[in-house]
Amino acid sequence: MYSTVGYEAEVKYRRQQIQKDLAKRQRASEARQTRRNRTR
């Protein structure tokens, strides 16, 4: 038997990890863009 509470906690945790990963990727791409703009 799988508890729904545990499942919800798992989903919430996974979603947080995805958000963190997205933010990290976004920051990296932004840094890359600013570097490109600076060389121009």
Image: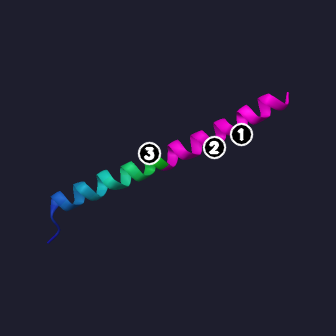
Residue position for label 1: 32
Q: Which stretch did the figure color magenta?
A: 21-40
Determine which residue is flagged by label 3. 19
Residue 8: quarter of image: bottom left
Secondary structure category for the residue under label 1: helix
What is the CA distance from the residue labelled 3 to the residue labelled 1? 20 Å
Magenta stretch, main secondary structure, is helix
Looking at the picture, tell me which residue is in the foreground, 1 or 39.
39
**Which one is in front, 7 or 23?**
23
Find the distance from the CA under tag 2 to the CA under tag 1.
6 Å
Dot 3 alpha-carbon crowd within 10 angstroms: few under 14, some 14 to 19, many 20 or more: few
Query: Which amino acid is tagged 1?
Result: Arg
Q: Are marks 2 and 1 in contact (CB under 8 Å)?
A: yes
Q: Residue at x 42, y 53 (%)?
A: 17
Disc 1 crowd rating (10 Å Cα; few below 14, some 14-19, many 20+) is few
Answer left or right for 35 relative to 18: right
Q: Nearer the viewer, mark 3 or mark 2?
A: 2
